[in-house]
Amino acid sequence: MELSIKYFRTVHLTYPFLHEPTHMSVIDRVYASQEGNPLDLFQVYMVLSIAALALSRECKVHLPVEGYYASAMKYVEHVCTDGSMTALQCLLLLMVYALHNPSSDVNIWNLNYQCLASVIDLGLQRDVRASSSLRISVFEQEMRTRVFWVVYTFDRAICTMMGRPIGVRDEACEMRFPLDIPDYNLVNPNISQHASEQSTSHMANAIHLFQLAKVNSEIKYVMHSVQRDVPAYAYPPVRDIFTWQRDIVNYLHNWLSEIPQPAGNAQDTMSKVCKIKYHETMILLLRPSPAIPSPADEILDLCFHQAIDLLQGFGDLYRAGSLLYSRLLVHSVFLGALVLLYCIWKLPRTTAKVRVDELVSNLMVAQNILSSIGEHWTEATRARDCIDELSTVTIQRLLSQPEARISSRPAHPEMNLRSGAMQDSSSTQIRQLQDPHPNESQALLAGNEDSNTLPVTLTAPAENLQNVNSYQFNLFDDLLQGDFQGWSGMSDFDGLMWEIFNNSPQ
């Protein structure tokens, strides 16, 4: 029972596709019956395996994770053929396990499409509401909506991670968000009348993340579609990609300011997770893409600051022991470090303001997290080694510049001073990007001058910037070239990560 509670205090806060009271009753049924329902048995064992996986890594103790998983897989055939809502919830449990335990043999890409097929088959993409003419309870209405949004979020996250097209398009779905109702109140038939009067529940952060998944979907449509010539039957294309990008920055900035702040340690962790997801989405929006292969320097500089904030956010959760290891985490940490290094090589003015000790500290956060995950997944070790090699070359380049001045103070692992300074600089840039001016580039670069107020910086005098610009060799010019026909010359981050994760030695 304690393991099941652990699941609902961690994973359930992000992916609320189960109903806690219902699951507890399922456990009672399993214990009371000698031959239980196969779906009930699968669900109970999978919840135990996921919770045991998280707890064993958190407490550094051995728990029978694989035993619970093996017991659940005895009933997987029933899950794949049942076609019910309960079967879809079981598939989602398998998805969570596969994402958090990459050593399993589950193909998450195929499983993702099996979940999408179940969503369409059950009609979960439609906004079906309880009414006098339709015999459906508020409980069933809300569980349908919650399950839909979890599948939707998984699809957008997995397709972004793998650099592949998204599954079901947004216009095929009626996008109603779930109500902010606690699980234990969801069975109340009159709860919908009082939902707006209640304080925020455990659903608040999940709903907020569902909203971000919808933005992720739009960014994938507009910026990361390989085919840029939109067919006539499709929705009208975005006429001004830069105006659209600015509008999305505005939306994300407002989204960040509206992150729910419920009381409790678990909810505080969820608030930090939301901020991390914000930085991930900003990087997806600002980094090179098929729509904008060569972003302006001020955009890449903002992307650089988002990458730093992303790694620092992961570092905070890692030190607190609240970081749940998963494939998505490995991808995000690796991408954040790559973007940071790419911008160092690409932007001379940004490079001129970087403090070497703090750059090393942020890169060490990425390497430490990947090393820790590498104990369970060898591809994470391969990603760490790649970051280590790139970091070494980058730091050597910075130290070889005669105008570089290195901080004499040892880098503190918390980096509190830098974190505040970086946040101020990043916030300044976002505000300036939100307010377009003819001299926007100059304003953004002026905003960066705030970082010069730090006591010791790696500084390049203005007269030396020409020398920095004349540095012809760029490490990423060769490293990030795609090998596909018709390569546009853009930086292929997705291609590099595919190589790292799929070409590990056998």
Image (cartoon, helix red, strand yellow):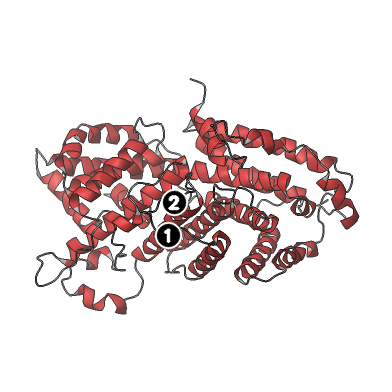
Disc 1 residue type? Pro
Q: Is residue 253 above or below residue 112?
A: below
Question: Can residue 191 be seen?
Answer: yes
In the picture provided, is 47 more to the left or to the right than 36? right
Q: Which residue is mark 1?
A: 236
Q: Quadrant location of residue 451?
A: bottom right
Determine which of the numbered discs, if any, sits on residue 230 in the image: 2
Along the line of sight, which residue is nearer the eye, 249 or 88?
Answer: 249
- Mark 2 or mark 1: whose residue is earlier in sequence: 2
Q: Are marks 2 and 1 in contact (CB under 8 Å)?
A: yes
Q: Within 10 Å of the Cα at label 2, are there few (<14), some (14-19), or many (20+) other Cα atoms? A: few
Residue sitting nearer the eye, 290 or 278:
290
Taking depth in this image into account, of 371 and 475 the one nearest to the observer is 475
Q: Where in the figure is residue 399, as x and y percent of width and height?
A: 82, 42
Residue drawn at point x = 67 percent, y = 60 percent:
422
Residue nearer the viewer, 1 or 95 = 95
Q: Is residue 219 above or below residue 185?
A: above
Q: Please, what secondary structure does the residue beneath circle 1 have?
A: loop
**Residue 163 locus on image (x, y percent):** 47, 41
Q: Residue at x 16, y 68 (%)?
A: 130
Specify whether residue 16 is in view. Answer: no
Q: Label 2 amino acid?
A: Val
